[in-house]
Image (cartoon, helix red, strand yellow):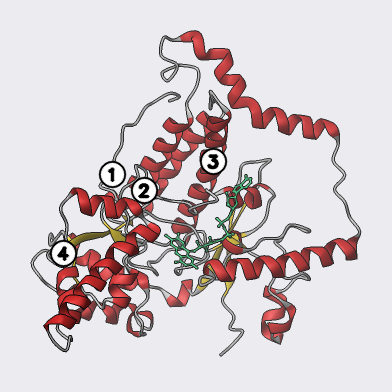
Amino acid sequence: MGGAVHVFKPRSTGEGFGRSWYPPFNSGASTFFTLDAGAEMTCQEVRFIPVRFKDAYGPVGAWFLLFKSIATNAYGGNYMQDNAAELDKWEPYGKVKPRPANIRNWLMMLDVMDGKSPIYMQTADAIQAIVDTAADEKDAKKKLKELEAEAWEDFLDMTISQAILWAATNTEPDKKPSEIMACDPYFIGSHSGASGAWVSGPEDVQTDETMDEYFWGYANMTTVSGLFAAGDASGASSHKFSSGSFTEGRIVGKSALAFILDNNTLPNVDQSVIDERIAEILKPLDMYEEHKDATTDPAINPNYIRPTQHIYRLQKIMDEYAGGVSAQFQTNDKLMERGLELLAFLKEDSENLAADSLHELMRSWESIHRMYQAESHVRSMLFREETRWPGYYFRNDKPTMDNDNWLAFCNCKYDRNTGEWEMIKRPVKYITQ
Ligand SMILES: Cc1cc2nc3c(=O)[nH]c(=O)nc-3n(C[C@H](O)[C@H](O)[C@H](O)COP(=O)(O)OP(=O)(O)OC[C@H]3O[C@@H](n4cnc5c(N)ncnc54)[C@H](O)[C@@H]3O)c2cc1C
């Protein structure tokens, strides 16, 4: 299968691949390194699906929270109201306020699946509602100008491409609504995404009931002695965001120092092992040099696969089999089993990755790392035989929440020597009541 080019462009929120399937910045590297070291991982099934302005990925938060905008389907229906009966199915999470992000997504997706697309952020109505509170005409004009500036600034601050798209499509937010949609999955420690390493909790918050299960000596140490994880790299903590991640990083730094002082250990690695690793890391460069002249176009070659091809192929497998955008975030056991089969072929072909530059070498390894994140995700979704986060993913073969069996953590471990995966169920124990 090496060298197969998949020209694939899903109906996407933009940016080719979307910013998708993996942590946005670390590209699955932390997952790979912890898995590869044999550390137990947790919540690898718990992904985050953001809703964004379509095609250029503009953030929706300012519109929903600051401008108090509503989103509707193409026919003007308010899906949060019209689909409210659905909330009963997902109690208690369906009934808490604010509604969890995945549940809001889900109510929107029901309209999409019901053929009521596109979904619109009603920007013009939201602006008008604020302008209507003006004291007089002069005040109304001033308010409108300020709101308009705020709306553009929101995009220019964070996602300039969305401002460019508005300009390119003559979109005036005070005059017409803009399309929004759910985009590709992320693996993070925020926005209710909780994937990462299974780490020891801090000692001071443990109770007699949790001590045995959640604490093993050093805060944030993984199940591999001396290996620590923080931020998006550590799991089962779904509301860290940026500030929580760097705070956790500080805690981990102190904890790792305590480990070093207590154990007085420095790694003692044989030079031959280091040489082996260097050769392994640089192999894609050698692969390219060795075979690049076998064809007239170095992108198409029977001996190797280029990183872009690898990334597209991975993205396509995950999108279609693991409930991505084009599958409307739905999957089932059979799709996932087939997805695992295809991932195994991809893993085989990863041995033949070829890089024409240091940049492509980085891309090669990024894609390999993402592949492990992807596999642990599929295996964990398959292991959890229920649907717990509709709107993030939906298992059509197990369409309900099953608290009797699955109010639990789904953990996994990978053995780099045998290539085997172990799936583990860990109990949920409450530290605070
Ligand atoms: C769509 C989206 C929106 C978000 N919005 C917000 C928000 O509004 N506010 C907020 O607080 N949080 C937000 N977050 C969450 C926040 O971005 C993350 O929780 C946070 O960035 C995690 O920090 P981290 O240091 O663990 O990981 P990262 O920020 O991903 O840092 C990991 C670093 O490791 C580097 N790296 C990776 N591999 C290697 C390697 N092999 N060698 C060397 N370096 C490597 C990467 O380049 C990167 O710099 C958002 C997340 C997403 C996905």
Task: Name above or below for residue 352 compared with residue 53.
Answer: above
Q: Judge: label 3 CB < 8 Å from ligand 1.
A: yes
Task: Identify which residue is drawn at 65% across, 47% down.
Answer: 36
- Can residue 98 be seen from the camera position used here? yes
Local packing at callout 3 (Cα closer than 10 Å; few below 14, some 14-19, many 20+) is some
Q: Nearer the viewer, mark 2 or mark 4?
A: 4
* Picture disc at residue 177: 4
For the residue pair 407 and 234, the one nearer the viewer reads as 234
Callout 1 amino acid:
Pro
x then y, percent, for residue 282: 65, 28
Question: What is the spatial separation of the Cα atoms under label 4 and label 3, in whole angstroms?
Answer: 37 Å
Task: Name above or below for residue 97 compared with residue 405.
Answer: below
Among the two numbered marks 2 and 3 on one chain, the one whose residue lies closer to the N terminus? 2
Q: Are marks 1 and 3 in contact (CB under 8 Å)?
A: no
Q: Are marks 2 and 1 in contact (CB under 8 Å)?
A: yes
x then y, percent, for residue 126: 19, 75
Q: Quadrant of the N terminus?
A: top left
Horizontal arrangement in the rendering, residue 336 relative to residue 370 (left or right): left
Among the two numbered marks 2 and 1 on one chain, the one whose residue lies closer to the N terminus? 1
Question: What is the spatial separation of the Cα atoms under label 2 and label 4, in whole angstroms?
Answer: 22 Å
Please tell me whether mark 3 sits on a helix, a strand or a loop: helix
Query: Which residue is labeled 1 in the image?
Result: 10
* Picture disc at residue 366: 3
Asked where in the image residue 182 lies, by quadrant, the reply is: bottom left
- Can residue 414 be seen from the camera position used here? no
x then y, percent, for residue 124: 15, 70
Callout 2 amino acid:
Gly
